[in-house]
Image (cartoon, rainbow, N blue to C red):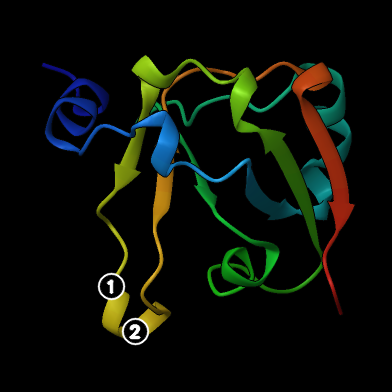
Amino acid sequence: MEIKDWMMRTSPKVKRKQLPRYLYHGTPSQNTFSIRQEGLRVHPYYGQSYFADSIENVMKFIGGDVTIFRVDTRKLNLKFLRISLDHNKSYYGDFECYAYYLDIKPSCLEQYMAPK
């Protein structure tokens, strides 16, 4: 079994009513052009992309020259969205992070620049 299959199978499913309207993904700005052209691709080994429920929470995981992408959760297939269990809530704060196990098309992403 691949790691992505195990992670998806063992992570909690997300119910639509518990999900915020938008999720946010942070990436080094050097990746901005390729994401705008090709979309957000899942990690080649782990098979997922990570999201938080706000720009402020994304910035707890990434720093430097960053671009933030927002996705409307109504455009996601919930069969492939899970609550991510790999962050320490006592360190980062008591909020949910999400893992999505499909690529996301560029047309589904809205670009934001991160606050400096």
Quarter occupied by the C terminus = bottom right
- The residue that appears at 28% across and 83% down in the rendered structure is 90
Task: Specify the farthest residue to the bottom.
Answer: 91
Q: Is the residue 93 above or below the residue 52 in the image?
A: below
Q: Quadrant of residue 106?
A: top right
> With 37 as the anchor, is 71 left or right in this view?
left
Residues at circles 1 and 2 in contact by the CB criterion of under 8 Å: yes
The three-letter amino acid code for the residue at tag 1 is Asn
Identify residue for label 1: 88
Q: In this view of the protein, which residue sits in the foreground, 4 or 104?
A: 104
- Residue 76 screen position, x and y as percent: 55, 20
> With 72 as the anchor, is 78 left or right in this view?
left
- The residue that appears at 60% across and 63% down in the rendered structure is 58
Q: Is the residue 28 above or below the residue 73 in the image?
A: below
> With 88 as the anchor, is 29 left or right in this view?
right
Q: In this view of the protein, which residue sits in the foreground, 91 or 79?
A: 79
- Residue 85 screen position, x and y as percent: 25, 53
> With 48 as the anchor, is 89 left or right in this view?
left
Identify residue for label 2: 91
Q: Secondary structure at mark 1?
A: loop
Quarter occupied by the N terminus = top left
- Residue 91 screen position, x and y as percent: 34, 84
Q: Residues within 10 Å of mark 2 (few under 14, many from 20)?
A: few
- The residue that appears at 36% across and 74% down in the rendered structure is 94
